[in-house]
């Protein structure tokens, strides 16, 4: 809520904001005591009249020194007296050290009785400290705000040095500004004005007020994480937060100084004067700008504050951090910053203010609502819901909100849009006006001119032998593939599908093979990593239907300092930046990259007799750092292309190589000066590609994949008597298209729109990798159970390379076939990988369920259970066992709930008709109904005839297909739980009426091969009738926003 006309403070702004905050209580969350909220608060202009009324020292100072602006630091302090005194001492000493004098202190009046038990137990002491520059200083406006920013950082650093990170929140600076103040607490919206007595004071007037009610998602509720923060309030989730924090750390290392110090102008370039506040800065004592332990919103605010203190407006800062979709060619501001700052991506509705501007912004997908209303007297109201600001004051008082007749404009923010109210000059500016005001600044075009930009267009694959030609014989190529861990399934299932259809293969749902660390076969390192996905309030995007907001664009070359306001290049001139349409390169494109940028090829092969894997990585890292630092390389190509069958050398696994070099360059402060490209034979799936990009690769040349696709296409062309060159080129295009589509699908599961934001984000979890591997190459990746060491990985690589050796002294005449590991399909017997659902186990299960004799059925079932027990451990839970507590008496069996009460809680997984056969689907429903539990229909609809009990008349006719004597009169095949996905999936009034529980699916599926897909050949006449769809049509879950 803001006064957009005169910009004068008013009481109605505060009242309307508080009323609106209470109206959005449903958007927040509460604890079990129903009073402790996840957080509620307001960000507003400083009400000096309220503070001066009960703080005489402040009133006297402001009256005596009207030209000396005062800053207000609101603090959460320890509640214990001794710790509180220590915190106050840290604050006052920091203020004096930063060039300020303490004008006054004030205890913020609060009423703890309105808090819930949980919030009250953790409630801090709340104080305000007022500071002014020491006598003779001239800090005003932005310079004062920069000095206060450095003061806040200094307070945090001083407290961290005193108490450590575990007690960081005990002394927390809520806000520190001469323009704005924040009131927030772990309470419900309705309790905010009762808790903070200032807020309910009639003298509390404001020019603007931002309100927020928090629903904590990825962090536990804490007083410090309640919102608003110092510049903004955020509704949503930043899915790219890991990458954003990583790259901010890389920028700090590259700058060789604290980013906040640079932002404040304390590290000027030649010929520039340092800001006066810099004389007081203790660079070592500021603490980090961003912190992975904080919430995504807290880090978003910290980075926005950093860019704002660097001289940008808060609107500029948010535009470069959260750019709109649709390209930036016509906007010099966005075009300049595109290579410099990866997007902070994810659902985001943001309100922001810095005292001069107040506004709101949506993410590029528009996944959060924001509606605004403008009145003829300049009042502007914006909220996630229409009508949140109440019109009434009660009694005979005139309403706070003007009548509808005085509305001059209503609207909503669209995807990537922003609105701003200028509190200084007045006026409301819509998205077009804001963008035009920002883009018209000459410095953006000047900065863009210094940034030598070349766009490397996608180049067609040639049909001849000039790029990724399959020059090796079939046997040699097979040996090379085997050395990198390929199997026949990778060729038959992966490459053939990609080269023929341009899509990834669709495999069965669920993985029943062992984890890589428990497998009897060697696996690429990628197999130890699991992709994370968006959670809680985040619907994953659909890369097909929402492709317009997604991009695989990448930039190669040196990246300038994005904190610098005008993006000035390093001394000596501009930088050369190469823009790629895709991260998947073929050989001629890679050569074109090296033609445009100074590059260095680094061989990732090493002599196993002389070096361990750890030593080989150390040597590679040393070479990479030297190439960038000493030889000025702007792109490093990590290549294993020289590996040949029978080679005595081993290769550093490409994921280990790129991760180790990536982190080594960060530590050396060189990461922004060069890009990494991986040229490898160990990349043939989208998961491999995502891992390489996620750990630092800007582009990948999967040469062995392209060679295999080329060979398959040439063979196919020969059979069909077609022109080989054309067939090969089309197959290679389809292969690359499959990788790109799969990569977009992986991004969409995280709710990420741009590959730049996924780059280096490490959005994975390791299962089965040891601490030494993580520390060397996957730094910051969670690996909770430990596992394979560097020595183990070297042994696995050696096993693969040795298995590919030619026993006939290197001749290619010996027939060599790729091994079939059976990772995707169980081979039976002792061949291939072990599977939970092996043919043997399936036969035992079928024998048990098809046996009508009760005694024999019990025996067959015991054989089935024994067969399961014989299976090697496949997952982590197979390694767990019950550990009895000998010190405790076991509870009496009579105290346990009865069998019927326990069985009522049993449910089956949601598997739809079609994914399961008709017989299996009905049998599960009958069994669960007998037990008193519930079966889940899945999203495939259900035959209405299943709602009625089976009778003697229908048992052998309508239910004869079950062929079981155990199906009896009175059995019911109705699923109690019904899923709703869309009308085409069999949802009808009868279907819903027969349900005892309804599951509404809003985000699962929607992406082929990720669940919720039924191939057309499974949609027979019966399933088509139930699902209300034509026979033979493939069915995929609906998009997440239906």
Image (cartoon, rainbow, N blue to C red):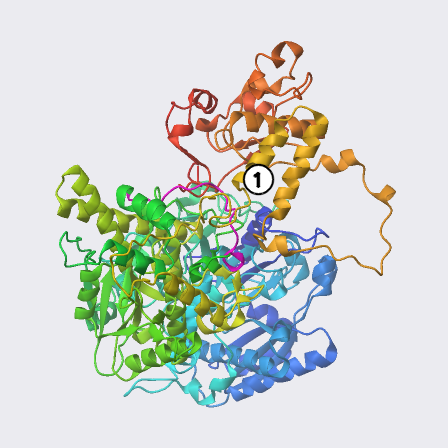
Q: Residue 971 at x, y = what percent?
A: 67, 20
Is 718 colored magenta in this rendering? no
User: Horizontally, is 994 left or right of 327 in the view?
Assistant: right
Along the line of sight, the residue nearer the viewer: 861 or 440: 861
Q: Does the magenta stretch include residue 510?
A: yes
Tell me which residue sits at (49%, 78%) in the image. Answer: 148
Residue stretch in magenta? 502-519
Residue name at image x 53 percent, y 24 percent: 942
Which quadrant of the figure contains the C terminus? top left
Q: Where is residue 414 in the image (x, y as percent from the top left)?
A: 37, 47
Q: The residue tagged with tag 1: helix, strand or loop? A: helix
Q: Which residue is drawn at 67% across and 83% down?
A: 86
Q: Position of residue 408 (x, y in %)?
A: 38, 45
Most foreground residue, 510 or 365: 510
Quadrant hosting residue 449: bottom left
Main SS category, magenta section = loop
Q: Quadrant of residue 269 in the image?
A: bottom left
Residue behind mark 1: 841
In this rendering, the answer to whether 1027 lies above or below 36 is above
Lateral position of residue 571 relative to residue 207, left or right: left
| Residue 209 position in % (x across, y down) | 51, 59
- The one of 312 and 564 positioned closer to us in this rendering: 564
Image side of residue 953 versus residue 379, left or right? right
Number of disc labels: 1
Residue name at image x 55 percent, y 84 percent? 95
Q: Residue furthest front?
A: 808
Q: How crowded is mark 1: few (under 14 residues within 10 Å), some or many (20 or more)?
A: many
Q: Is residue 318 visible?
A: no
């Amino acid at each position: 809520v803001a006064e957009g006309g005169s910009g004068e403070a008013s009481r109605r702004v505060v009242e309307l904001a508080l009323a609106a905050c209470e109206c959005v209580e449903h958007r927040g969350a509460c604890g079990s005591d129903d009073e402790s909220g996840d957080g509620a608060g307001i960000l507003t202009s400083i009400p000096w009249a309220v503070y001066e009324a009960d703080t005489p020292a402040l009133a006297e100072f402001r009256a005596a020194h009207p030209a000396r602006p005062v800053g207000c630091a609101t603090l959460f302090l320890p509640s214990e007296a001794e710790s509180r005194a220590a915190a106050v001492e840290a604050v006052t000493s920091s203020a004096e050290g930063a060039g300020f004098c303490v004008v006054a202190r004030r205890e913020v009046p609060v009423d703890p009785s309105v808090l819930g038990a949980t919030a009250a137990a953790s409630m801090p002491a709340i104080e305000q400290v007022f500071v002014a520059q020491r006598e003779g200083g001239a800090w005003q406006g932005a310079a004062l705000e920069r000095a206060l920013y450095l003061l806040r950082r200094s307070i945090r650093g001083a407290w961290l040095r005193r108490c450590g990170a575990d007690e960081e929140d005990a002394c927390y600076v809520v806000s520190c500004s001469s323009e704005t103040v924040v009131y927030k607490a772990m309470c419900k919206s309705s309790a905010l004005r009762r808790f903070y007595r200032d807020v309910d004071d009639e003298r509390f007037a404001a020019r603007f007020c931002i309100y927020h009610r928090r629903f904590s998602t990825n962090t536990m509720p804490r007083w410090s994480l309640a919102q608003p923060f110092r510049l903004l309030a955020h509704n949503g989730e930043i899915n790219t937060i890991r990458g954003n924090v990583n790259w901010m750390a890389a920028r700090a290392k590259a700058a060789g100084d604290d980013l906040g110090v640079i932002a404040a102008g304390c590290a000027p370039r030649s010929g520039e004067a340092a800001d006066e506040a810099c004389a007081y800065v203790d660079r070592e004592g500021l603490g980090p700008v961003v912190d992975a332990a904080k919430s995504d919103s807290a880090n978003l605010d910290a980075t926005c504050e950093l860019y704002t203190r660097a001289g940008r407006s808060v609107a500029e800062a948010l535009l470069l951090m959260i750019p709109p979709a649709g390209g930036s060619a016509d906007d010099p501001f966005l075009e300049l910053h595109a290579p410099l700052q990866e997007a902070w991506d994810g659902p985001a509705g943001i309100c922001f203010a810095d005292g001069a501007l107040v506004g709101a912004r949506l993410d590029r997908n528009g996944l959060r609502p924001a509606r605004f209303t403008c009145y003829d007297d300049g009042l502007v109201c914006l909220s996630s819901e229409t009508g949140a600001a109440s019109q009434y004051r009660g009694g005979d008082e005139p309403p706070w909100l003007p009548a509808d007749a005085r509305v001059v404009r209503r609207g909503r923010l669209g995807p990537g849009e922003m609105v701003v109210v200028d509190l200084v000059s007045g006026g409301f500016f819509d998205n077009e006006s804001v963008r035009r005001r920002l883009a018209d600044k000459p410095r953006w075009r000047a900065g863009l001119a210094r940034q030598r930009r070349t766009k490397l267009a996608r180049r067609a694959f040639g049909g001849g032998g000039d790029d990724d030609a399959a020059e090796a014989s079939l046997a040699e190529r097979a040996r090379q593939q085997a050395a990198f861990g390929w199997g026949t399934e990778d060729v038959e299932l992966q490459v053939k599908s990609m080269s023929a259809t341009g899509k990834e293969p669709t495999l069965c749902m669920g993985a029943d093979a062992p984890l890589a660390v428990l497998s009897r076969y060697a696996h690429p390192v990628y197999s130890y990593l699991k992709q994370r996905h968006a959670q809680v309030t985040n619907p994953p995007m659909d890369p097909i239907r929402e492709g317009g907001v997604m991009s695989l664009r990448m930039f190669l070359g040196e990246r300038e300092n994005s904190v610098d306001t005008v993006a000035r290049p390093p001394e000596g001139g501009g930088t050369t930046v190469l823009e790629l349409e895709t991260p998947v390169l073929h050989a001629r494109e890679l050569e074109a990259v090296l033609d445009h940028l100074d590059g260095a090829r680094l061989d990732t092969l090493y002599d196993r007799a002389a070096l361990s894997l750890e030593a080989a990585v150390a040597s590679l890292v040393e070479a990479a750092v030297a190439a960038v630092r000493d030889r000025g390389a702007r792109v490093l190509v990590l290549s294993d292309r020289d590996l040949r069958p029978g080679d005595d050398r081993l290769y550093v696994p490409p994921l280990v190589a790129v991760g180790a070099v990536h982190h080594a360059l960060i530590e050396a402060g060189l990461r922004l000066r060069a890009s990494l490209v991986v040229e490898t034979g160990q990349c043939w799936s989208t998961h491999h590609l995502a891992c390489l990009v996620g750990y630092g690769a800007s582009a990948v040349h999967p040469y062995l994949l392209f060679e295999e696709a080329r060979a398959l296409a040439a063979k196919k062309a020969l059979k069909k008597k077609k022109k080989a060159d054309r067939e090969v080129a089309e197959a290679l295009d389809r292969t690359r298209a499959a990788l790109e589509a799969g990569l977009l699908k992986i991004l969409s599961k995280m709710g990420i729109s741009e590959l730049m934001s996924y780059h280096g984000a490490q959005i994975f979890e390791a299962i089965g990798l040891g601490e030494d591997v993580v520390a060397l190459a996957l730094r910051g990746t969670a690996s909770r159970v430990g596992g394979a060491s560097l020595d183990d990985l070297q042994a696995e690589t050696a096993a693969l390379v040795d298995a590919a050796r030619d026993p006939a002294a290197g001749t290619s005449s010996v027939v060599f076939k790729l091994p079939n590991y059976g990772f995707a399909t169980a081979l039976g017997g002792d061949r291939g990988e072990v599977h939970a659902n092996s043919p043997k186990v399936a036969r035992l299960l079928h024998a048990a369920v098809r046996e009508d004799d009760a005694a024999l059925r019990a025996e067959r079932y015991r054989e089935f259970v024994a067969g399961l027990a014989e299976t090697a451990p496949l997952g982590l839970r197979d390694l767990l066992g019950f550990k009895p507590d000998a010190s405790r008496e076991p509870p009496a069996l009579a105290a346990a709930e009865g069998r019927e009460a326990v069985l009522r809680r049993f449910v089956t997984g949601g598997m739809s008709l079609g994914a399961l056969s008709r017989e299996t689907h009905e049998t599960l429903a009958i069994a669960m109904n007998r037990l008193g539990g519930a079966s889940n229909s899945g999203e495939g609809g259900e035959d209405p005839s299943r709602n009625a009990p089976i009778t003697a008349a229908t048992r052998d006719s309508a239910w004869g297909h079950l062929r079981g004597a155990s199906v009896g009169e009175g059995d019911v095949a109705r699923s109690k739980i019904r899923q709703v996905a869309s009308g085409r999936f069999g949802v009808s009034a009868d279907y819903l009426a027969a349900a005892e529980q309804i599951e509404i699916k809003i985000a699962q599926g929607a992406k082929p091969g990720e669940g919720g897909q039924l191939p057309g050949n499974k949609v027979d006449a019966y399933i088509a009738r139930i699902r209300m769809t034509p026979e033979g049509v493939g069915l995929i879950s609906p998009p997440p926003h239906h």
